[in-house]
Amino acid sequence: MNDRHSLLDSILGAFVPIHSDGYKFVFGAALATLLLFAVASPLGWLGAIATAYCAYFFRDPERVTPARVGLVTSAADGKVAAVTDVAAPNELQLGREKLTRLSVFLSIFDVHIVRAPVAGRIVRSHYVPGAFFNAELDKASEENERRALVIETETGEKIGLVLIAGLIARRIVTFVDEGTSVARGERIGLIRFGSRVDVYLPEGARILAEIGQTAIGGETMLAELVRSEEARQVRPVTESGVTEG
């Protein structure tokens, strides 16, 4: 009985849940597939493949997010395409000083759920209409359609996050608004069909990721915030001389 139960758990564990935003696309593709089968069997099988891919694209796996204070985790699955110092885009309102930008490129085969890279409060959310260039190009950060978010941590650091539409992606969906408090690794958005996510870090952040590295949203450590790390290490001392915490 236990062996049968373990086998069932293993089989069910192989199936990743689909995010609710993808239901209408999967059901639509399935309906079209039935109609195609009625017309011609080969067309129906093509529709079945398209339906399976649609379900695969909108998969929403659970993630185990590191709990250590001060970490910045990847906001998305994909390849770390760039680590560079640039001025943050105007829509983030983070000043004109150069900040370190880490860019993660999502292919059409990656999970497209976007997660909060740090815990904090959404203090800015701004939509920018634009073009749909290949998201791997540098100009995509400034010219493509995008949604800019700023998360302020409990220690006052502001992290910029920009969800960028790509050559195929034509829709950016966010689940949070200004004033929303989020946990690190919490689902905050979805970009449909190929895209890029840029994370802008405050001065002094220690970079932990490398270009070409494969990142897992909510799990891969991109950087460590110095101020948050210092706050973790410096604890108040009581009158008796004992350190609290």
Image (cartoon, rainbow, N blue to C red):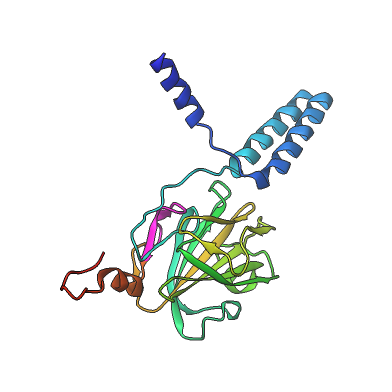
Residue positioned most to the top? 1
Viewer-closest of 59 and 20: 20
Left or right of 124, for residue 212: left
Q: Quadrant of the N terminus?
A: top left
Q: Residue at x 57, y 51 (%)?
A: 112
Q: Residue at x 49, y 52 (%)?
A: 77
Residue positioned most to the left? 241
Q: Position of residue 99 (x, y in %)?
A: 44, 78
Q: Position of residue 36 (x, y in %)?
A: 80, 30
Viewer-closest of 239 and 182: 239
Magenta stretch: includes residue 138: no
Left or right of 198, for residue 67: left
Can you tell which quarter of the image residue 227 is in? Answer: bottom left
Can you tell which quarter of the image residue 194 is in? Answer: bottom right
Residue positioned most to the bottom? 96
Using the image, determine if residue 167 lies above or below residue 28.
below
Q: Position of residue 219 (x, y in %)?
A: 41, 52
Figure label count: 0
Q: Residue at x 39, y 79 (%)?
A: 203
- The range drawn in magenta is 211-223
Q: Quadrant of the C terminus?
A: bottom left
Q: Main secondary structure of the magenta part?
A: loop
Magenta stretch: includes residue 214: yes
